[in-house]
Amino acid sequence: MLFALSLALAAVDGGAPQSASAVPDSWHSFKMTDIDGKVRSMSEYKGKTVLVVNVASKCGLTPQYTALEALYEKYKDKGFVIVGFPCNDFKGQEPGTEAEIKEFCSATYNVKFPLYSKIHVLGPEQHPMYTWLIKNTDGKDIEWNFGKFLVDGKGHVVGRFGSRTKPDDPQVVEAIEKEIATKSR
């Protein structure tokens, strides 16, 4: 019941409840604040294959931004998008403000895929969207920055990849291509 209540509270960004019994049935049910402060519904990604990634600017894995952006550029015209959620949960490796994060990603890695405001992906402050993503995969906590969830066009989690699995790993690319092909049939 606590899980259902926390998810119901998060279906609208900022914790405004919809109803105590409204457990999101898809990733598209969530509303999140983008890096520029605008509340956006994940339902705008209906019909697209989405890679959800918790990102950080001062991590040994930060160079993954290069491969993430390359994946985005390669598949964006085929209905694929990457959404990045900055997170400071792992040894303070995302300490900046949203403006600083946006500037770093743009200037250093030429990131064009959508970025959102910082959120927690671990612990008691874990954002309910991440609680939902984890519950709908293997149930294991995010182990570090750059954990990846693959969401299909209906908003269901269809894959999960660890932080050290690079975005251009054949396993990730194959899963993305499979989802894109499934969508086009």
Image (spheres, rainbow, N blue to C red):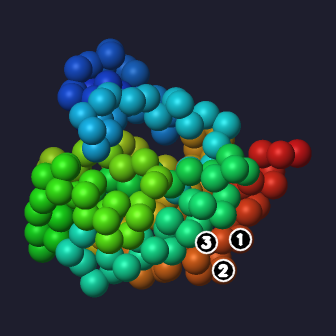
Q: Is residue 96 left or right of residue 134?
A: left
Q: Tell me if label 3 and label 1 are in contact, CB under 8 Å.
A: yes
Horizontal and vertical percent position of residue 123: 17, 56
Which amino acid, mark 2?
Pro
How far apart are labels 1 and 2 at the CA level? 6 Å
Reading the image, the residue beneath label 1 is 174
Q: Tell me if label 1 and label 2 are in contact, CB under 8 Å.
A: yes
Q: Looking at this view, name the residue that lies furthest to the right.
A: 185
How far apart are labels 2 and 3 at the CA level? 5 Å
Q: Looking at this view, name the residue that lies furthest to the top.
A: 19
Q: Nearer the viewer, residue 105 or 60?
A: 105
Reading the image, the residue beneath label 3 is 172
The vertical placement of 45 against 50, above or below, is above
Residue at 49% in and 79% down: 166
How far apart are labels 3 and 1 at the CA level? 5 Å
How busy is the neighbourhood of tag 3: few (under 14 within 10 Å), some, or many (20 plus)?
many
